Amino acid sequence: MKKSLGFKLILLLVMAGLISIFFLFDLDQYFSLVNLKNKLDAFKAYYGQHKLMTMVGYMVVYIVMAALSLPGAVIMTLAGGAVFGLFYGTLLVSFASTLGATFAFLFSRYMFRSWVQNKFSSKLAAINNGIEKEGGFYLFTLRLVPAFPFFVINLVMGLTTIRTIVFYGVSQVGMLPGTIVFINAGTQLAKIESAGGIISLNIILSFALLGIFPFITKRLTDYVRQQKVFSKYSKPGNYDYNLVVIGAGSAGLVASYIAAAVNAKVALIEARKMGGDCLNTGCVPSKALIASAKLLSYVKRAKEYGFETISIEFDFATVMERVQSIIKKVAPHDSIERYTGLGVECIRGRAQIVSPFEVRVNDKILTTKNIIVATGATPFIPDLPGLEKIRYLTSDTIWDIRVLPKNLIVLGAGPIGCELAQGFSRLGSQVTLVQRGSQIMKKEDPDAAQMVLNRFQTEGITVALNHSAKKIEINEKAKQLICDHNGKEVKIVFDEILIALGRVPNINGFGLEELGVELGKNKQIETNEFLQTNFPNIYCSGDVHGRYQFTHTAAHESWFACVNALFGRFKKFSVDYSTIPWATYTDPEVARVGVNETDAELAGIDYEMVKYGIDDLDRAITDSEDHGFVKVLTVPGKDKILGVTIVGNHAADVIAEFVLAMKHGIGLNKILATIHIYPTMAEANKYAAGLWKKIHAPKKILAWVEKYHAWMRK
């Protein structure tokens, strides 16, 4: 072991010494375009007298430079074309550059691979798997594009598990097109005899080829990748559709709407109800329930508004029927009739992708140029012993009940769990919110979550933090959830239990796994920045993508997926997640955009923070809703907004100004300079900007201004 370390140290010192000599003695001056032009005639004359020696010497120098990752490869390549011509220049440079690259690769592998792989084994597992499967093709893609520094590729590839023979072979082939382009440019460079020769047609064409080569190679690699993926499948002579969209939730509706708007022939397939989860079991029914429950909360707070007593009689079943009536009222917006009128062919049935170009539905095969998978997500059901013996509720099924649960357990304190826990508590259920961790709403900052927790406890919700559900027991008297709380067994009696532990992408039964569409560790569909799967003509958007499971994000992604699917051969757009806002509709509401303090600290992002308390806001005081805050994170010393968290009444509406500001690069100074109507909740944004301005006031200038005013009083 010590001998190995000693040899590595010697080798490292030798390499460092050679590189130091190169720069200390200004050897890089010999590898410049000016020097090449000045010495070109001498090089060619020597080559004419000593052909073999010149070739060998040239290759040795090139190999050493490539192995040491020294600058000058471009000049050396141009020199090869200028001195040896297109054929011999290409031959010499191709082998010299590949051999030099392989030596650099082996040096990196010998010196550093073991340490890197051991140190970062968990993080590199996915990369190693990818290299095992597609390492050669990945390297080939990098070699084709000169924009990637080849010396970096050599060193980084040495740290991976790619085989040396594969590295050499792929490098030899992958660098050949670029080598030919540069050698050709070198042959034309040799023909420049005067200033006028610089603008000759051959020179212009050669260097123009250098400029467009990266674009050509990108097209070529895309084509090669597609041919590799599609090689197992037969393409139809003609396609029935430009686009088939699977799933008629928010993502599918937006994608099909956009496709129809640009006169593409599009089919939208849905097995259940149009509108998906958002309309039928998610956003619409939950907000309808929250609205009814909020009215009851005001009754309990009657004295805050100057009333001695108020009472409301209600029937829970009628409240739930109101929820259904709201769904029916919104449903026409997402109906088959509306989308058929917009030019979308709506098909009811279960879709199955049988090839990248074929979708089976109702025993009929539809051929299509592109596919968008927008199949949404379903509630996650844990493997909890005893759960299978009872009827449990989820965010999909809770809307079917018509009897108010007396004792309701909500398992999971994320957005869905918190919203429904508060809603049912206000309607009269004794609610116990069970959370395995130490904080509700774990994606929010602790101070935001604490404000919601305080309200929950004030309203009588039992919040069981650090309670890990272990099993469900049923006896003659009651149903009980058995939890572990800091090593002690805790039993919670319930009539109904709502499972609210998040949602998992809905991928089963659509032919995705059978086809070989790549899935992530959470069974979400893996895509690139253009929302393409590993099949270039199959895209996905919405909850099945798994990144942000929000209705508005699904719509946002669908624009990119649809436009890239239909027009990607001309221009692709990478999806922008920089300003994704979201809200939890508890009371108080919690809304966010960008990073919060928790995210920033985990990611090591430097920030400044200002926090304006809404208890100071006039409109909040008049509404007896004077609680919450606006917290803004900015770049240190600048008014650029990194993220915002708002807790309070109508937080989801108030945050829109910050979303716009972040999207279009508007800073706090401009928000401060914007007139806000008085009295409104939105004034809180201006006051938060004012706090930032106060902190960043130019103290030295103000000190001089104070002296000026004192002088003026004399």
Image: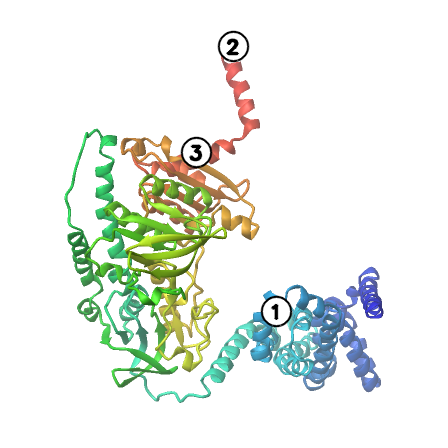
Can residue 701 be spotted in the picture?
yes
Q: Nearer the viewer, residue 427 or 495?
A: 495
Q: Amino acid at mark 1?
A: Phe
Q: Amino acid at mark 3?
A: Gly
Q: Amino acid at mark 2?
A: Lys
* Among the 4 quarters of the image, the one containing residue 108: bottom right
User: On residue 714, which mark appears?
Assistant: 2
Q: How is the image coloured?
A: rainbow
Mark pair 3, 2: CA separation: 32 Å
Answer above or below: position of 260 versus 661.
Answer: below
Query: From the viewer's perspective, is 37 left or right of 245?
Result: right
Nearest to N terminus: mark 3 or mark 1? 1
Which residue is farthest top?
714
For numbered disc 2, what is the local secondary structure?
Answer: loop
Q: Which residue is mark 3?
A: 690
Residue found 31% across the figure and 73% down from its top: 245
Q: Which residue is mark 1?
A: 148
Mark pair 3, 1: CA separation: 46 Å
* Percent coordinates x, y for residue 624 in the rendering: 29, 33
